[in-house]
Image (spheres, coloured by chain):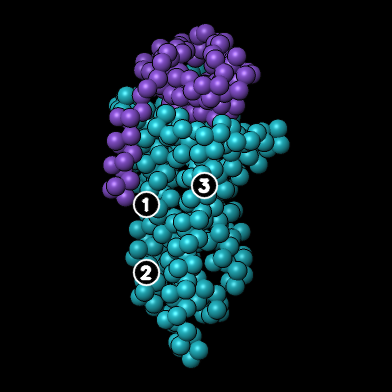
Amino acid sequence: MFGTAVIVFREMLEAALIVGIVAAATRDVPKRARWIVAGVLCGLLGAAIVAGFTDRISQFASGVGQEIFNASILGIAVVMLGWHSIWMSSHGAKLAANARNIGNAIRDGSKERQILLIVIGVAVLREGSETVLFLYGIAASETTGATGMLMGGLVGALAGVVVGYALYAGLLKIPMRWFFSATNTLVLLLAAGMASQAARFLIQANLLPSLASPMWDSSALIADKSVVGRLLHGLIGYDSRPAGMQLVFYMIALIAILIGTRWVKRNHTHVAAKPAAERGNIPAVDSRTV
Amino acid sequence: MKAFLLLIFMLPAFAWADGDEILITLKNHRFEPTQVTAPAGQKLKLRIENKDATPEEFESDSMGREKVVPGNGSAILFVGPLTAGKYSFYGDYHEKTAQGVLIAK
């Protein structure tokens, strides 16, 4: 049972970190709790379906269907997170300036909600499908049986939720002035890390050259399997032996999002210069930011 | 997004220009052979055949690879180019028994 819990926790951790960060980053989106729950439920349902179709997915594209599937899902998440990051940069700057009005500054976050749903959904789906397969194996073959499997699975999942919640609660403690820069930085690194993972899958499928392989080896310093290694992997895409191509993807994602952010910020300050000066009223809804 | 997906799905058409594959079989949650030798400095194609009824995840930290192999199914994956040395791999779902090593020369 303990072994099961550890493996489930390991698989859950990455998804939990993503949910924690995204939930914090969208703190002012109204009714976001139900969208987060919907994302998790859709992800779990998707995970069960993907697990059921593993054979088919594996055989697809001459045996590298899994890699293409994973890379595509990661690609979608990168685009969504990048989108979030870019649009938040204009909104967040304004909120930080009006920090005490945060409670009133409600935005019409319909786009944000979709992003929330998709990012959380695909994160849970990706990590969840492996967990489902693993649990299925345990229940089918080993002496642990279904009860031990269920108990272990629950304990592991609960531990994952605790870590995700701790991250979320910790992020909310950040003073409002820095909050959006902090969460935006985390989202940015999350996206870049996912881009690097997508590259790794495409290299594994022989669809991309690895360039230098590996670029460096820091496994003696921080092993991928260590707790720190896992946390860093989930947060910033740490890989102890990355291929050169992974680094290329990481940098491209990082730079593309930063350029987008700069661009939106600049356009925003041009337009918003006047209203900001006569800030008597709370800029409650800004239709351009959503 | 559509263009991106299209590109991704078209890629396999150009992808396979590879030679021999290295076959590793899984049975009773053990690898067979447990030790394989392969040339260093070139991309390697591994085929993992799972003779067990339950799925397994082929995983290697040193090669930076992980891939689910369906029960009674097989999967291929590419590793390297590797520098000469020992690279251990294991089955993530049955780590106690499923252990092996790839030696690159």
Question: Picture coordinates of residue A36 (x, y %)?
Answer: 41, 55
Residue appearing at x 30%, y 36% in the figure = B9
Question: Picture coordinates of residue A106 (x, y %)?
Answer: 42, 74
Is residue A215 visible in the rendered image? The answer is yes
Q: Which mark is residue A202?
A: none
Q: Which mark is residue A250?
A: 3
Query: In this figure, which residue is indicated by the disc labeled 1?
Result: A118
Question: Picture coordinates of residue A66 (x, y %)?
Answer: 38, 31
Q: Is residue A116 left or right of residue B9?
A: right
Q: Quadrant of residue A220?
A: top right
Q: Quadrant of the N terminus of chain A?
A: top right
Name the one closer to the observer, B34 or B41: B41
Which secondary structure lies at badge 1?
A: helix
From the image, state the color of chain B.
Answer: purple
Question: Picture coordinates of residue A73 (x, y %)?
Answer: 38, 43
Q: Amino acid at mark 3?
A: Tyr
Residue count near mark 2 (Cα–Cα under 10 Å), binned few <14, some 14–19, many ≥20? some
Q: Amino acid at mark 2?
A: Val
Q: Which mark is residue A290?
A: 2
Residue count near mark 3 (Cα–Cα under 10 Å), binned few <14, some 14–19, many ≥20? many
